[in-house]
Amino acid sequence: MTSTTHKPGRRKARSDSDLGRAADAFTDPGRRRASPGQASGTTRGASSRYHHGDLRRALLTAAAGLADLENLSLRELAAGIGVTAAAAYRHFENREALLDALALDGFAALQARFEAVCPMAEQPADAAQAMAQLGRLGEAYLRFADDSPALWRLMFGAHGARSRTDEPRTGRPNSYAYLPAALAALFVTGVIPTAPSAADEIFAWSTIHGAATLRQGRVAAAQGAPDGLAAMLVARIVRGLGGAGAPVSDQRPPDCDNPGSLA
């Protein structure tokens, strides 16, 4: 019998070339249909981008689109975007590390939504504007949970707790800064009689967060348009904080007065 001599160095080169093309195809879908000759011609550029972190971002992007993050497998995630598990482990020590990073991405995305509808540098000029600002924050929170339910649940679990502890200090407001600022504006504009405390912040956040949770559970009374639900919740938050009548719609979603609708 004739033995076959393997050449590890050559096999390693082919593997790296294939990985470079796979990572490049993921970040640039237009190259997926390239001929073998064209692909080999772009190997050096693809490999360079991979080593600068494209694969890490590709893994996070793919994970963010999953409906089930609790049972995520890093190996399966890597296979899904056409790279080896070994390549994925160069960027994340394990699935827990990837989920921690994904939760941090989630908070950054939530902060961007808050800033888009309620710029931190713009202060409400009167009571109506202050109420509207809190309503927009509530709506943005509900829509985020609706749009990315698995990511939203991840953010407020153990992985989110670790990411909040390790959150990089960028000098920009994080997602937690917007609600206290909005509640403070209610006081400054005379909507509520006393400056909001930490307990008031928890009360307000729990109200919106609870509604988002009920929406995920398909509870009928929490369904409907996010803007209408947010306005109704804001009116009750203001009353809970001692405010008088609210200058926003107090209309409740259909069947909200029917106890059976809470099932």
Image: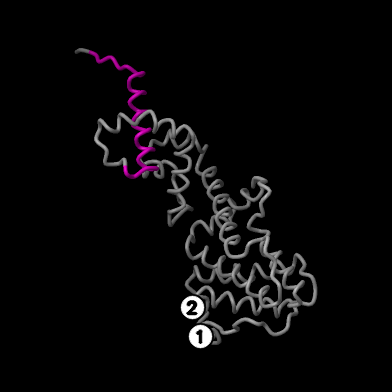
Q: Residue furthest left?
A: 1
Magenta-drawn stretch contains 29:
yes
- Residue situated in front as seen by the camera: 1 or 80: 80
Q: Which residues are magenta?
A: 3-30
Q: Earlier in the sequence, mark 1 or mark 2?
A: 2
Residue depicted at x 77% and y 71%: 188
Residue type at the position of mark 2: Ala
Q: Dot 1, crowdedness within 10 Å: few (<14), some or many (≥20)?
A: few
Q: Residue furthest top?
A: 2
Q: Label 1 belongs to which residue?
A: 255
The answer, for residue 66, to whether it is visible in the render is yes
In the image, residue 27 sits, relative to residue 111, either above or below, namely: above
Q: Percent position (x, y) of residue 27?
A: 40, 42
Check contact, mark 1 vs mark 2: CB within 8 A.
yes
Q: Percent position (x, y) of residue 72?
A: 45, 49
Residue type at the position of mark 1: Asp
In the image, residue 132 sits, relative to residue 43, either above or below, namely: below
240 relative position to 260: left or right: right
Magenta stretch secondary structure, dominant: helix
Q: Percent position (x, y) of residue 74?
A: 44, 43
Residue 220 is marked as 2
